[in-house]
Image (spheres, rainbow, N blue to C red):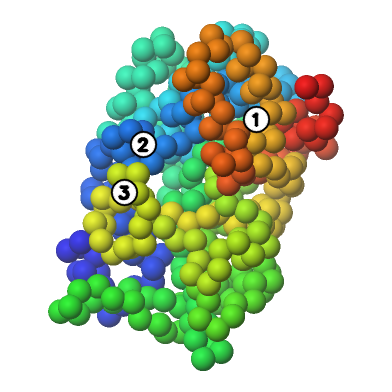
Protein backbone atom coordinates (compact mmCIF):
# COMPACT_ATOMS: atom_id res chain seq x y z
CA UNK A 1 0.00 0.00 0.00
CA UNK A 2 2.84 2.37 0.86
CA UNK A 3 4.51 1.79 -2.50
CA UNK A 4 1.24 2.59 -4.30
CA UNK A 5 0.76 5.75 -2.21
CA UNK A 6 4.36 6.74 -3.00
CA UNK A 7 3.67 6.34 -6.73
CA UNK A 8 0.44 8.39 -6.47
CA UNK A 9 2.18 11.17 -4.54
CA UNK A 10 4.97 11.27 -7.11
CA UNK A 11 2.57 11.68 -10.03
CA UNK A 12 -0.39 13.39 -8.32
CA UNK A 13 -2.69 10.68 -9.64
CA UNK A 14 -2.37 7.37 -11.50
CA UNK A 15 -4.75 5.53 -13.84
CA UNK A 16 -6.68 2.59 -12.42
CA UNK A 17 -4.65 0.38 -14.81
CA UNK A 18 -1.42 1.53 -13.11
CA UNK A 19 -2.93 0.85 -9.67
CA UNK A 20 -4.11 -2.61 -10.74
CA UNK A 21 -0.72 -3.40 -12.32
CA UNK A 22 1.03 -2.67 -9.00
CA UNK A 23 -1.57 -4.39 -6.80
CA UNK A 24 -1.47 -7.59 -8.85
CA UNK A 25 1.97 -7.72 -10.48
CA UNK A 26 4.46 -5.82 -8.30
CA UNK A 27 7.57 -8.10 -8.43
CA UNK A 28 7.62 -8.60 -4.65
CA UNK A 29 4.25 -7.64 -3.14
CA UNK A 30 1.84 -8.07 -6.07
CA UNK A 31 -1.01 -10.55 -5.56
CA UNK A 32 0.18 -12.82 -8.41
CA UNK A 33 3.83 -12.72 -7.37
CA UNK A 34 3.47 -13.49 -3.66
CA UNK A 35 3.52 -16.93 -2.03
CA UNK A 36 -0.13 -16.54 -0.97
CA UNK A 37 -2.47 -19.48 -1.58
CA UNK A 38 -4.82 -18.10 -4.27
CA UNK A 39 -6.83 -21.00 -5.62
CA UNK A 40 -8.91 -23.71 -3.95
CA UNK A 41 -10.51 -24.09 -0.55
CA UNK A 42 -7.81 -22.12 1.30
CA UNK A 43 -7.48 -19.46 -1.38
CA UNK A 44 -9.79 -16.80 -2.77
CA UNK A 45 -11.56 -18.58 -5.67
CA UNK A 46 -11.83 -21.86 -7.64
CA UNK A 47 -10.79 -22.41 -11.27
CA UNK A 48 -11.85 -25.20 -13.69
CA UNK A 49 -8.59 -27.21 -13.41
CA UNK A 50 -8.91 -27.36 -9.62
CA UNK A 51 -12.45 -28.76 -9.92
CA UNK A 52 -11.48 -32.05 -11.62
CA UNK A 53 -8.70 -33.48 -13.83
CA UNK A 54 -11.29 -34.24 -16.57
CA UNK A 55 -10.99 -30.57 -17.58
CA UNK A 56 -7.28 -30.97 -18.39
CA UNK A 57 -7.90 -34.30 -20.16
CA UNK A 58 -10.42 -32.66 -22.51
CA UNK A 59 -8.01 -29.81 -23.24
CA UNK A 60 -5.38 -32.49 -24.03
CA UNK A 61 -7.83 -34.06 -26.48
CA UNK A 62 -8.26 -30.66 -28.13
CA UNK A 63 -4.49 -30.10 -28.34
CA UNK A 64 -4.01 -33.50 -30.01
CA UNK A 65 -6.57 -32.55 -32.68
CA UNK A 66 -4.87 -29.16 -33.20
CA UNK A 67 -1.51 -30.94 -33.57
CA UNK A 68 -2.93 -33.23 -36.31
CA UNK A 69 -4.54 -30.27 -38.13
CA UNK A 70 -1.26 -28.31 -37.94
CA UNK A 71 0.55 -31.18 -39.69
CA UNK A 72 1.88 -33.58 -37.02
CA UNK A 73 5.21 -31.73 -36.58
CA UNK A 74 6.84 -30.30 -33.45
CA UNK A 75 4.10 -28.82 -31.25
CA UNK A 76 4.60 -26.36 -28.40
CA UNK A 77 1.92 -25.55 -25.83
CA UNK A 78 2.43 -22.16 -24.17
CA UNK A 79 0.41 -21.76 -20.96
CA UNK A 80 0.02 -18.27 -19.49
CA UNK A 81 0.45 -18.25 -15.69
CA UNK A 82 0.02 -21.88 -14.65
CA UNK A 83 -0.79 -21.26 -10.94
CA UNK A 84 -0.10 -24.40 -8.89
CA UNK A 85 0.38 -26.40 -12.11
CA UNK A 86 -2.77 -28.54 -12.01
CA UNK A 87 -3.78 -27.86 -15.61
CA UNK A 88 -0.34 -28.48 -17.10
CA UNK A 89 0.17 -31.68 -15.11
CA UNK A 90 -3.31 -33.01 -16.07
CA UNK A 91 -2.68 -32.17 -19.75
CA UNK A 92 0.84 -33.68 -19.80
CA UNK A 93 -0.23 -36.84 -17.94
CA UNK A 94 -3.09 -37.35 -20.39
CA UNK A 95 -0.90 -36.70 -23.47
CA UNK A 96 1.71 -39.18 -22.13
CA UNK A 97 -0.89 -41.91 -21.57
CA UNK A 98 -3.37 -41.37 -24.39
CA UNK A 99 -1.53 -39.60 -27.21
CA UNK A 100 2.04 -41.00 -27.39
CA UNK A 101 2.61 -39.68 -30.96
CA UNK A 102 1.82 -36.14 -29.85
CA UNK A 103 3.99 -36.64 -26.75
CA UNK A 104 6.97 -37.48 -28.97
CA UNK A 105 6.57 -34.06 -30.71
CA UNK A 106 5.48 -32.13 -27.67
CA UNK A 107 7.01 -29.32 -25.61
CA UNK A 108 5.18 -27.50 -22.78
CA UNK A 109 6.19 -23.88 -22.10
CA UNK A 110 4.98 -22.17 -18.92
CA UNK A 111 4.96 -18.37 -18.84
CA UNK A 112 5.33 -17.57 -15.14
CA UNK A 113 6.66 -14.60 -13.20
CA UNK A 114 6.02 -15.97 -9.70
CA UNK A 115 9.05 -17.85 -8.27
CA UNK A 116 6.91 -19.63 -5.62
CA UNK A 117 4.43 -20.85 -8.26
CA UNK A 118 7.30 -22.01 -10.49
CA UNK A 119 8.66 -24.17 -7.67
CA UNK A 120 5.22 -25.74 -7.00
CA UNK A 121 4.76 -26.45 -10.73
CA UNK A 122 8.20 -28.05 -10.90
CA UNK A 123 7.50 -30.34 -7.91
CA UNK A 124 4.10 -31.35 -9.28
CA UNK A 125 5.57 -32.21 -12.70
CA UNK A 126 8.42 -34.16 -11.07
CA UNK A 127 5.81 -36.24 -9.26
CA UNK A 128 4.44 -37.47 -12.63
CA UNK A 129 7.97 -38.08 -14.01
CA UNK A 130 8.00 -35.35 -16.64
CA UNK A 131 11.50 -34.95 -18.05
CA UNK A 132 13.23 -31.60 -18.32
CA UNK A 133 13.31 -31.53 -22.12
CA UNK A 134 9.48 -31.63 -22.17
CA UNK A 135 8.88 -28.50 -20.03
CA UNK A 136 10.46 -25.05 -19.83
CA UNK A 137 9.70 -21.78 -18.03
CA UNK A 138 9.56 -18.35 -19.69
CA UNK A 139 8.56 -14.74 -19.06
CA UNK A 140 6.25 -12.17 -20.63
CA UNK A 141 6.64 -8.39 -20.36
CA UNK A 142 5.60 -5.35 -22.35
CA UNK A 143 8.47 -6.22 -24.71
CA UNK A 144 6.89 -9.60 -25.41
CA UNK A 145 7.86 -13.22 -24.75
CA UNK A 146 11.29 -14.59 -23.85
CA UNK A 147 11.24 -17.39 -26.47
CA UNK A 148 11.44 -17.78 -30.27
CA UNK A 149 8.59 -18.40 -32.71
CA UNK A 150 6.65 -21.63 -32.23
CA UNK A 151 4.25 -23.95 -33.98
CA UNK A 152 1.54 -25.00 -31.53
CA UNK A 153 -1.03 -23.46 -29.22
CA UNK A 154 -1.11 -20.54 -26.78
CA UNK A 155 -3.36 -21.64 -23.92
CA UNK A 156 -4.79 -19.46 -21.17
CA UNK A 157 -7.37 -20.22 -18.51
CA UNK A 158 -8.44 -17.17 -16.46
CA UNK A 159 -5.50 -15.02 -17.56
CA UNK A 160 -7.11 -12.16 -19.50
CA UNK A 161 -9.61 -11.28 -16.72
CA UNK A 162 -6.73 -10.22 -14.45
CA UNK A 163 -4.93 -7.93 -16.91
CA UNK A 164 -4.94 -4.28 -15.75
CA UNK A 165 -7.87 -2.18 -17.04
CA UNK A 166 -8.59 1.53 -17.46
CA UNK A 167 -11.94 2.74 -16.14
CA UNK A 168 -13.99 5.26 -18.10
CA UNK A 169 -17.26 7.04 -17.36
CA UNK A 170 -19.51 9.71 -18.84
CA UNK A 171 -19.91 12.76 -16.61
CA UNK A 172 -21.96 15.77 -17.78
CA UNK A 173 -22.00 14.16 -21.25
CA UNK A 174 -18.16 14.20 -21.39
CA UNK A 175 -16.05 11.02 -21.50
CA UNK A 176 -13.68 10.95 -18.50
CA UNK A 177 -11.23 8.51 -16.97
CA UNK A 178 -11.29 7.42 -13.32
CA UNK A 179 -7.91 8.01 -11.64
CA UNK A 180 -6.57 6.94 -8.25
CA UNK A 181 -5.40 9.72 -5.92
CA UNK A 182 -4.41 10.07 -2.25
CA UNK A 183 -4.74 12.56 0.61
CA UNK A 184 -4.75 12.42 4.42
CA UNK A 185 -8.13 10.68 4.40
CA UNK A 186 -6.72 7.87 2.26
CA UNK A 187 -6.95 6.65 -1.34
CA UNK A 188 -9.79 8.16 -3.36
CA UNK A 189 -11.01 8.28 -6.98
CA UNK A 190 -10.96 11.38 -9.14
CA UNK A 191 -12.19 11.98 -12.72
CA UNK A 192 -10.12 13.71 -15.38
CA UNK A 193 -9.35 13.68 -19.11
CA UNK A 194 -8.82 10.33 -20.78
CA UNK A 195 -5.13 9.33 -20.48
CA UNK A 196 -4.66 8.00 -24.03
CA UNK A 197 -6.43 8.32 -27.38
CA UNK A 198 -6.35 4.50 -27.63
CA UNK A 199 -9.20 4.39 -25.07
CA UNK A 200 -11.46 6.53 -27.28
CA UNK A 201 -10.58 4.42 -30.32
CA UNK A 202 -11.47 1.29 -28.34
CA UNK A 203 -14.99 2.62 -27.64
CA UNK A 204 -15.42 3.61 -31.30
CA UNK A 205 -14.26 0.26 -32.71
CA UNK A 206 -16.39 -1.68 -30.21
CA UNK A 207 -19.31 0.72 -30.78
CA UNK A 208 -19.78 1.21 -27.05
CA UNK A 209 -22.04 4.17 -26.26
CA UNK A 210 -22.02 4.97 -22.55
CA UNK A 211 -24.95 6.61 -20.79
CA UNK A 212 -24.56 9.45 -18.29
CA UNK A 213 -22.85 8.07 -15.14
CA UNK A 214 -22.13 4.67 -16.69
CA UNK A 215 -18.71 3.14 -15.93
CA UNK A 216 -16.86 0.74 -18.22
CA UNK A 217 -13.52 -1.03 -18.11
CA UNK A 218 -11.15 -1.02 -21.08
CA UNK A 219 -8.51 -3.72 -21.35
CA UNK A 220 -5.79 -2.34 -23.65
CA UNK A 221 -3.31 -4.90 -22.25
CA UNK A 222 -5.29 -7.79 -23.79
CA UNK A 223 -4.87 -6.42 -27.34
CA UNK A 224 -1.16 -5.87 -26.72
CA UNK A 225 -0.79 -9.43 -25.40
CA UNK A 226 -2.50 -10.89 -28.50
CA UNK A 227 -0.21 -8.87 -30.73
CA UNK A 228 2.81 -10.44 -28.96
CA UNK A 229 1.16 -13.88 -29.19
CA UNK A 230 0.72 -13.53 -32.95
CA UNK A 231 4.32 -12.33 -33.27
CA UNK A 232 5.53 -15.62 -31.72
CA UNK A 233 2.97 -17.97 -33.33
CA UNK A 234 4.29 -19.13 -36.69
CA UNK A 235 1.44 -21.59 -37.16
CA UNK A 236 -1.28 -22.91 -34.86
CA UNK A 237 -3.93 -21.82 -32.42
CA UNK A 238 -4.78 -19.55 -29.50
CA UNK A 239 -7.17 -21.10 -26.95
CA UNK A 240 -8.56 -18.60 -24.42
CA UNK A 241 -10.91 -19.70 -21.63
CA UNK A 242 -12.28 -17.06 -19.29
CA UNK A 243 -15.43 -15.55 -17.86
CA UNK A 244 -17.02 -12.78 -19.86
CA UNK A 245 -19.06 -12.25 -23.03
CA UNK A 246 -19.25 -10.35 -26.29
CA UNK A 247 -19.47 -6.54 -26.05
CA UNK A 248 -23.25 -6.75 -26.58
CA UNK A 249 -23.70 -9.32 -23.83
CA UNK A 250 -21.54 -7.41 -21.34
CA UNK A 251 -23.31 -4.08 -21.77
CA UNK A 252 -26.75 -5.70 -21.79
CA UNK A 253 -26.16 -7.65 -18.58
CA UNK A 254 -23.98 -5.49 -16.39
CA UNK A 255 -25.80 -2.22 -15.83
CA UNK A 256 -23.96 0.99 -15.13
CA UNK A 257 -21.20 0.00 -12.70
CA UNK A 258 -19.00 -2.16 -14.92
CA UNK A 259 -17.79 -5.66 -14.03
CA UNK A 260 -14.74 -4.90 -11.85
CA UNK A 261 -14.71 -7.15 -8.75
CA UNK A 262 -12.35 -8.32 -6.01
CA UNK A 263 -12.14 -11.87 -4.65
CA UNK A 264 -10.97 -12.46 -1.10
CA UNK A 265 -11.44 -15.75 0.78
CA UNK A 266 -14.30 -16.81 -1.53
CA UNK A 267 -16.26 -13.60 -1.04
CA UNK A 268 -16.79 -10.95 -3.72
CA UNK A 269 -16.35 -7.25 -2.93
CA UNK A 270 -15.83 -3.91 -4.65
CA UNK A 271 -13.36 -2.45 -2.14
CA UNK A 272 -10.63 -2.15 -4.76
CA UNK A 273 -8.28 -0.14 -2.54
CA UNK A 274 -8.50 -2.40 0.53
CA UNK A 275 -5.81 -5.08 0.98
CA UNK A 276 -3.78 -4.31 -2.18
CA UNK A 277 -1.64 -7.34 -2.98
CA UNK A 278 -3.81 -9.59 -0.80
CA UNK A 279 -6.95 -9.90 -2.94
CA UNK A 280 -7.63 -10.64 -6.59
CA UNK A 281 -8.99 -7.88 -8.84
CA UNK A 282 -10.66 -8.97 -12.08
CA UNK A 283 -13.10 -7.89 -14.78
CA UNK A 284 -15.26 -9.84 -17.21
CA UNK A 285 -13.45 -10.36 -20.52
CA UNK A 286 -14.81 -8.56 -23.58
CA UNK A 287 -14.39 -11.31 -26.17
CA UNK A 288 -15.37 -9.00 -29.05
CA UNK A 289 -12.26 -6.99 -28.15
CA UNK A 290 -10.12 -10.18 -28.31
CA UNK A 291 -11.60 -11.11 -31.71
CA UNK A 292 -11.01 -7.60 -33.14
CA UNK A 293 -7.52 -7.31 -31.65
CA UNK A 294 -6.66 -10.78 -32.90
CA UNK A 295 -7.79 -10.00 -36.44
CA UNK A 296 -5.60 -6.88 -36.58
CA UNK A 297 -2.67 -9.01 -35.37
CA UNK A 298 -3.26 -11.73 -37.99
CA UNK A 299 -5.28 -14.22 -35.91
CA UNK A 300 -8.49 -15.56 -37.48
CA UNK A 301 -11.49 -16.54 -35.35
CA UNK A 302 -11.92 -20.33 -35.38
CA UNK A 303 -14.94 -20.21 -33.09
CA UNK A 304 -16.48 -18.84 -29.89
CA UNK A 305 -18.78 -20.76 -27.55
CA UNK A 306 -19.81 -21.34 -23.93
CA UNK A 307 -17.64 -23.60 -21.79
CA UNK A 308 -20.66 -25.91 -21.34
CA UNK A 309 -21.03 -26.45 -25.13
CA UNK A 310 -17.30 -26.81 -25.59
CA UNK A 311 -16.81 -29.48 -22.90
CA UNK A 312 -19.90 -31.45 -23.97
CA UNK A 313 -18.74 -31.39 -27.62
CA UNK A 314 -15.29 -32.62 -26.47
CA UNK A 315 -16.86 -35.56 -24.65
CA UNK A 316 -17.19 -34.62 -20.97
CA UNK A 317 -20.37 -36.73 -20.59
CA UNK A 318 -18.62 -39.84 -21.94
CA UNK A 319 -15.63 -39.26 -19.65
CA UNK A 320 -18.01 -38.82 -16.72
CA UNK A 321 -19.63 -42.17 -17.56
CA UNK A 322 -16.19 -43.78 -17.43
CA UNK A 323 -15.44 -42.51 -13.91
CA UNK A 324 -16.39 -44.59 -10.89
CA UNK A 325 -19.66 -42.59 -10.83
CA UNK A 326 -19.38 -41.67 -7.16
CA UNK A 327 -21.69 -38.79 -6.36
CA UNK A 328 -18.85 -36.46 -5.31
CA UNK A 329 -17.11 -36.79 -8.71
CA UNK A 330 -20.38 -36.34 -10.61
CA UNK A 331 -21.23 -33.14 -8.71
CA UNK A 332 -17.72 -31.73 -9.13
CA UNK A 333 -17.58 -32.40 -12.87
CA UNK A 334 -21.14 -31.16 -13.38
CA UNK A 335 -20.03 -27.77 -12.05
CA UNK A 336 -17.72 -27.42 -15.09
CA UNK A 337 -20.58 -27.48 -17.61
CA UNK A 338 -23.75 -26.70 -15.64
CA UNK A 339 -25.27 -23.33 -16.69
CA UNK A 340 -25.47 -22.23 -13.03
CA UNK A 341 -21.90 -23.38 -12.33
CA UNK A 342 -19.06 -22.45 -14.68
CA UNK A 343 -20.80 -23.62 -17.84
CA UNK A 344 -22.40 -20.41 -19.11
CA UNK A 345 -20.41 -17.54 -17.57
CA UNK A 346 -17.13 -19.06 -18.88
CA UNK A 347 -16.55 -18.79 -22.62
CA UNK A 348 -14.05 -20.35 -25.01
CA UNK A 349 -12.47 -18.40 -27.86
CA UNK A 350 -10.24 -20.20 -30.36
CA UNK A 351 -8.20 -18.31 -32.95
CA UNK A 352 -5.84 -19.67 -35.60
CA UNK A 353 -2.97 -18.56 -37.81
CA UNK A 354 -1.59 -20.09 -41.04
CA UNK A 355 -4.04 -23.01 -40.76
CA UNK A 356 -6.59 -23.48 -43.53
CA UNK A 357 -10.23 -23.46 -42.29
CA UNK A 358 -9.76 -25.77 -39.23
CA UNK A 359 -12.77 -27.76 -38.01
CA UNK A 360 -12.46 -28.47 -34.29
CA UNK A 361 -14.47 -31.07 -32.37
CA UNK A 362 -15.02 -28.73 -29.39
CA UNK A 363 -16.74 -26.15 -31.62
CA UNK A 364 -19.20 -28.42 -33.45
CA UNK A 365 -22.91 -27.71 -32.90
CA UNK A 366 -24.39 -29.77 -30.09
CA UNK A 367 -27.31 -31.01 -32.22
CA UNK A 368 -24.70 -32.92 -34.29
CA UNK A 369 -23.78 -35.06 -31.27
CA UNK A 370 -25.35 -38.45 -30.78
CA UNK A 371 -26.40 -38.26 -27.14
Instruction: Please tell me which residue is depicted at 36% across the width and 33% down the height of the picture.
Output: 40
Looking at the picture, does residue 336 appear above or below residue 204? Answer: above
Residue 116 horizontal side relative to residue 221, left or right: left
- Secondary structure beneath label 3: strand
Residue position marked by numbered label 2 in the rendering:
39
Q: Quadrant of the N terminus?
A: bottom left
> Which comes before the other along the chain, label 2 or label 1?
2
Comparing 300 with 37, the one in front is 37
User: Which residue lies most toward the bottom here?
Assistant: 172
Spatial CA distance of label 2 from label 1 is: 22 Å
Instruction: Give the left or right position of residue 40, taking residue 275 as reference.
Output: right
Q: Residue at x 69, y 35 (%)?
A: 309
Which residue is denoted by mark 1 in the rendering? Answer: 311
**Number of numbered discs present?**
3
Res 105 seen here: no
Q: Which mark is residue 264?
A: 3
Amino acid sequence: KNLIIEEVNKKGKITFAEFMQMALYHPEYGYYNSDKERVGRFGDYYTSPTVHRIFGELIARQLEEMWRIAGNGPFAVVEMGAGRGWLCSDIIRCVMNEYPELYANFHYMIVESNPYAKEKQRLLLESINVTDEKVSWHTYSEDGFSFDRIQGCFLSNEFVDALPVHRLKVKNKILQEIYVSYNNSGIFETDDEVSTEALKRYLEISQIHLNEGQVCEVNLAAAEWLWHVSEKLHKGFVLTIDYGDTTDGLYRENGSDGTLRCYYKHTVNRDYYERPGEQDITTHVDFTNLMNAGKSAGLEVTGFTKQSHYLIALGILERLNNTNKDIETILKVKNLFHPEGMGDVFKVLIQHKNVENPQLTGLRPLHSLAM
